Image (spheres, helix red, strand yellow):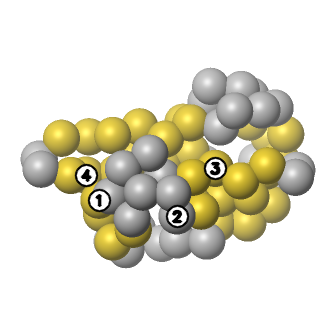
Amino acid sequence: MTEVKANMAGNVWKIVVEEGETVTEGQDTAILESMKMEIHNSTTTDGTVKEFKVSEGDFINEGDVIAIIE
């Protein structure tokens, strides 16, 4: 099990994959917005998205878990 964590604080602008979807290392899982910039958060492993811990529009801090990959 791998956690995808936010690389900086910001608003969850868009979730780009769905629960149950297969992802590959380096694939974006969510895009954050901070100071009018888009910050891409990617998975560090291949697997399947088990669960999202955030929703679009949520504010999250650096290090918060975005998704769980199995």
For residue 66, side relative to residue 47 (left or right):
left
Label 1 crowd bin: few (<14), some (14–19), many (20+), radius 10 Å = many
State if disc 4 and disc 1 touch (CB < 8 Å): yes
Task: Answer yes or no: is residue 13 visible.
Answer: no
Frontmost residue, 39 versus 57: 39
Q: Amino acid at mark 1?
A: Gly
Residue 59 against residue 43 in the figure, above or below: below
Residue appearing at x 36%, y 50% in the figure:
8
Q: Return the x and y of residue 15 as percentages of the image width and height.
A: 48, 55
Residue appearing at x 49%, y 41% in the figure:
41
* Marks 2 and 3, how far apart at CA: 8 Å
Name the residue tied to disc 3.
4
Name the residue tied to disc 1.
10
For residue 32, side relative to residue 23 (left or right):
left
Q: Amino acid at mark 2?
A: Asp
* Marks 4 and 2, how far apart at CA: 15 Å
Name the residue tied to disc 2.
64
Which of the numbered marks, if any, corresponds to residue 63?
none
